[in-house]
Amino acid sequence: MARIYSKRQAPHLAPPLVLILIYAGLIVLGCAALKLPFATTTPITWSDAAFTATSAVTVTGLAVVDTGSAFTLFGQAVVMLLIQLGGLGLMTFAVLILSMFGLPVGFTHRLYLREDLNQTSATDLLALTRMILKVVFICEFVGAALLASVFVPEAGWGEGLWQALFHSVSAFNNAGFALFPDSLSKWVGNPIINLTIPALYILGGLGFTVASDIWRVRRWHRFSLHTKLMLVGTIALLIWSALAFGIMEWTNPGTLGSLSWSDRLWASWFQGATTRTAGFNTVEIGNLTDGTSLMFMTLMVIGAGSTSTGGGIKVTTFIVLLLATVAFFRQRSSIQVFGRELGLDQVMKVLALSIISVLLILCALFALLLCHEGDFLDLAFETTSAFGTVGLSRGITGDFDGAGRAIIMAVMFVGRVGPLTLGFLLATRRPRRIGYPAGTVYLG
């Protein structure tokens, strides 16, 4: 008599959960690699290695040790690899490797890739992935070539080329890691630095779907609504942030006040552009006025574009919030923009993402205030920078103890991979079984 064995099925994990586990695993591997004796010039603690790995994978740029002096060439290469994998997404590279070996990409892998790229459909993902990789490597190669014209004459061919490549990768992925203790302050008035670095992180911050649209369509009237909103929103935020920074800091001796007239203009452009995503700086962030710091915190919360290498609630989320407010005061039940209409479901998603983001920042800031003594503005700035995966700091990152570092690491991680989970939950629709009569709540 034949026996019938029950076949246990492997537990099914949602794609966002798998990606979160993969990102966490990459942080663990990066931490172990950075703790190797030949990865550092002097021994660092496990806390230093874990914080650096988390900051690199989440493309934040906050650092507790100086990347250029604390790590050897191997350690710097590990940091750069973590930035590249964390910025573009592990699934993008996985699909590339499978394609190189001629292996098929199954439906499950397409689901994971869809979540990693924040797409609503699993179709055409392979073409999008290949286009992403082409754009990325072309941009990083051109950026490294331009930066080499600055670094090679100063550091020599070997060191100069490495510095150019590292900063090109770090800039395009909006990481903000630099090999110099004062970031890029040495080149505050250098035109090549002030044009190349911002161009890289602006392109990386627009988002892969926007890059795909521009690459394939190349005509404004045929662009998708998302692409139009991203381009208009990005340009508007760049102009506003650069002008506002220049006006508020023009006479501040700690930032622009001590620079020449031309250097002030370059610094205003660079710092205004880098605030939402990248984390590089050419002036001392700790010397900013309170008003400028508050503006920076607002920009860091807004962040970059969806499916980009940057963080934050995203530019399109901010735009939809503004449009919904305008529609409310005009007593409209929907949002009209660029000949398209956004319904209530889009507004609900935007509200959910925004509220969760604000609550996360407030809870993390409250926890930091309980376990770490420091200036309120400094802690608030650091928390917002960690959530937006920006990397700008008022100089207190190295002062945190173990609990403070753990909080900042958690905020960086959630700021990078949290939207994946939230997007999955918002995209999952469950039919209502019970309906209730409409009610009225008095607001305001």
Image (spheres, helix red, strand yellow):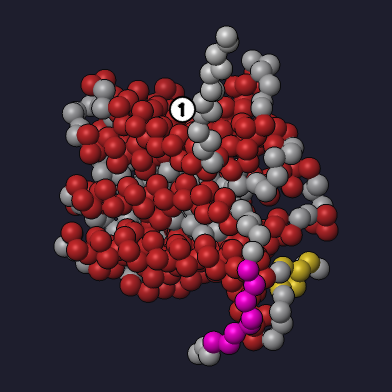
Q: Nearer the viewer, residue 268 or 110?
A: 110
Between 57 and 423, the residue placed more toward the observer is 423
* Up-down relation of residue 159 to residue 62 (above or below): above
**Residue furthest top as drawn:** 1
Q: Tell whether position 422 is magenta.
A: no
| Residue 310 falls left or right of residue 82 | right
Magenta residues span: 434-441
Q: Secondary structure at mark 1?
A: helix
The residue at 74%/39% (across/down) is 123
Residue name at image x 32 percent, y 25 percent = 33
Neighbor class of circle 1 (other Cα within 10 Å; few <14, some 14-19, many 20+) is some
Residue for point 18% across, 59% down? 371
Relative to 212, 290 lies left or right: left
Q: Which residue is tagged 1?
A: 161
Whether residue 233 appears in this view of the structure is no
Judge from the rendering whether residue 157 lies leftward or rightward of residue 379; answer left or right.
right
Question: Which quadrant is the N terminus positioned in?
Answer: top right
Q: Which amino acid type is marked by label 1?
A: Leu
**Residue sitting at 66 percent across and 27 percent down?**
106
Q: Is residue 353 visible?
A: yes
Residue 305, horizontal then vertical, whole percent:
58, 54
Q: Position of residue 364 (x, y in %)?
A: 31, 60
Main SS class of the magenta portion in the image:
loop
Above or below for 8 versus 192: above
Estimate the x, y position of residue 61 in percent, counting from the top left. 38, 45
Residue sitting nearer the eye, 224 or 157: 224
Looking at this rendering, what residue extends furthest in the front direction? 1
